């Protein structure tokens, strides 16, 4: 089977990130891997209710070494029990 990935992924080392759903509610997640185009994130309570494939969300990537954060508007491209793939749309 041919790989469909456009960008190389790197390990996220379980870094902390926050997901914000369209209704403004948030949940904590961990970053499993990341590329220039998106990320694989996992949550301890499963994929948050209200986030389905095609939905918009915002992810905040938190630096473990300081107060630096990066925010991106995203789209959910796939989901499974406890994890989902998000595609970065724009940096906020």
Image (cartoon, rainbow, N blue to C red):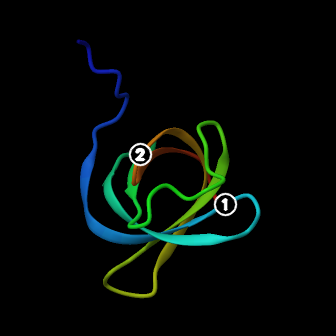
Question: Foreground residue, 49 or 89?
Answer: 49
Question: Foreground residue, 48 or 3?
Answer: 48
Q: Residue furthest top?
A: 1
Q: Quadrant of residue 27?
A: bottom right
Disc 2 vs disc 1: which is toward the camera?
1
**Which quadrant, please, contains the C terminus?**
bottom right
In this rendering, is residue 28 above or below 41? below
In this rendering, is residue 26 above or below 83? below
Q: Secondary structure at mark 2?
A: loop
Question: Foreground residue, 8 or 87?
Answer: 87
Residue wearing tag 1: 21
Judged left or right of residue 79, residue 74 is right
- Mark 1 Cα within 10 Å, few/some/many (few <14, many 20+)? some
Residue wearing tag 2: 36
**Which quadrant, please, contains the N terminus?**
top left
Q: Quadrant of residue 23?
A: bottom right
In percent of width and height, residue 4 lies at: 35, 21
Report the residue at 28% width, 43% height from top: 9
Q: Which mark is residue 41?
A: none
Judged left or right of residue 3, residue 72 is right
Q: Residue furthest bottom?
A: 66
- Mark 2 Cα within 10 Å, few/some/many (few <14, many 20+)? few
In percent of width and height, residue 53 lies at: 59, 37
Q: Secondary structure at mark 1?
A: loop
Report the residue at 66% width, 53% height from top: 50
Judged left or right of residue 14, residue 41 is right
Report the residue at 73% width, 68% height from top: 24
Point out the tag, 2 or 1, that comes first from the N-terminus: 1
Q: CA distance from mark 2 to mark 1?
A: 22 Å
Report the residue at 45% width, 87% height from top: 67
In this rendering, is residue 77 above or below 20? above
Q: Residue furthest right?
A: 23
């Amino acid at each position: 089977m041919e790989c469909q990935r456009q960008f190389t992924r790197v390990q996220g080392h379980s870094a902390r990130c926050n997901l914000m759903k369209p209704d403004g509610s948030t949940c904590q997640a961990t970053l499993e891997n990341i590329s220039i185009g998106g990320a694989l994130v996992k949550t301890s309570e499963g994929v948050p209710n209200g986030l389905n494939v095609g939905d918009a969300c915002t992810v905040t990537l938190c630096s473990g070494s300081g107060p630096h954060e990066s925010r991106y508007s995203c789209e959910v491209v796939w989901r499974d029990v406890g994890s989902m793939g998000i595609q970065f749309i724009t940096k906020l």
